[in-house]
Image (tube, rainbow, N blue to C red):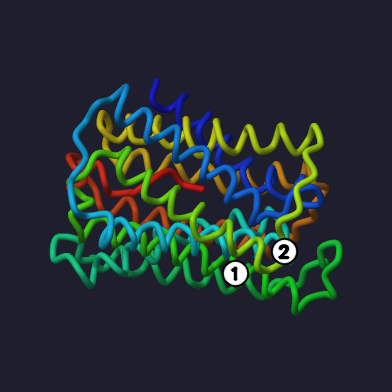
Amino acid sequence: MAAAIMVVLCLTWGAQQVAIKLVAADVSPMMQVALRSGIAALLVWGVGHWVVRTAWLQDIWYRSGAVVGLLFAAEFLFIAEGLRWTTASHMAVFLYTAPLFAAIGLHVRLPEERLNTRQWLGIGLAFAGIAVTFLTPRTAVEGAPGFVSSLLGDALGLCAGAAWGLTTVAVRTSRLSEAPATQTLFYQLAGACVLLMPLAFITGQSSVNLTGAALASLAFQTLAVSFASYLIWFWLLKRYLAARLGVLAFMTPLFGVLMGVLWLDEHTTDRFLFGAVLAMAGLLVVNLGKGATQQNNQKAITRAPQ
């Protein structure tokens, strides 16, 4: 049952970058993220207060809540800007470097998260894969002047992965590790909306052309991704080992690459795919090394993979 649910969730998450890029001409990626995050935040708040009815922790929004909100906004700022220069396939791979940054950050901050020799080897393998994918020659995306610009997009994707990984560290090392999932998710979504909405207007990326495709994409991103899939993910974390679910979640970048090729006619090279496989293999080694110590740690992965 859990495996079947994870396949559906990974398909949903893998389609996210494709859905953003598919309607970027109608609604800028930054505005898409701001709109979907604001609506989803209201829905999560309603679920938390009227359905789940779990008491939220008091007096943490201005410290821990603000930090994770800022990091969430930074992650999606990097995704939105990166998708202007690189492909959804590349973004899906670089975003999923997040567990790498989280593992290193938790190694520094928490004694129980110290990495063993096998995990350090996995990190080395992952970095090698990232280097291969990052330096792979690629065809420029539409509107981009070439290799340098696509490198910029990939670099922003890597920054998005780092911001996601730091979000994990921030939650694990703060009072949010004791907070209900709805509270943590609300802070993240609200932070993205509050910070990215004005930024979209300031940078001239606020135009909205609500075509049928744009409405369908925004509905999918808001209801399926930002709202339903994240809550289902937290529900799974309460019932199954986080490490095992994390392994299954690595299907997401594979689905992201596949859907980018099928829906957006993106092109990938054998070298890029080889590097992506190396990076994912390294991350799997790191993640599997956590083992059963995460059995009761529902916050091991702070929210659903993007």
Quadrant of the rendered image containing residue 185: top left
Amino acid type for the residue under numbered disc 2: Thr
* Image position of 117 (left or right of 228): left
Q: Residues within 10 Å of mark 2 (few under 14, many from 20)?
A: many
* Image position of 131 (left or right of 282): right
Q: Quadrant of the N terminus?
A: top left
Q: Are marks 2 and 1 in contact (CB under 8 Å)?
A: yes
In percent of width and height, residue 226 lies at 50, 39
Residue found at x 35% / y 58%: 68
Residue found at x 59% / y 45%: 35
Front in this rendered view, residue 272 or 234: 234
User: What is the number of callouts on the image?
Assistant: 2
202 to 258, vertically: above or below: below
* Image position of 40 (left or right of 142): left
Report helix, strand or loop for mark 1: helix
241 to 104, vertically: above or below: above
The residue carrying mark 2 is: 86
In percent of width and height, residue 190 lies at 44, 49
In percent of width and height, residue 12 lies at 57, 35
Quadrant of the rendered image containing residue 61: bottom left
Amino acid type for the residue under numbered disc 1: Leu
2 or 1: tag closer to the N-terminus:
2
* Image position of 222 (left or right of 293): right
Q: Residue furthest bottom?
A: 148
Front in this rendered view, residue 299 or 44: 44
The residue carrying mark 1 is: 156
Q: Which mark is residue 167?
A: none
Q: Residue furthest left?
A: 111
Report helix, strand or loop for mark 2: loop
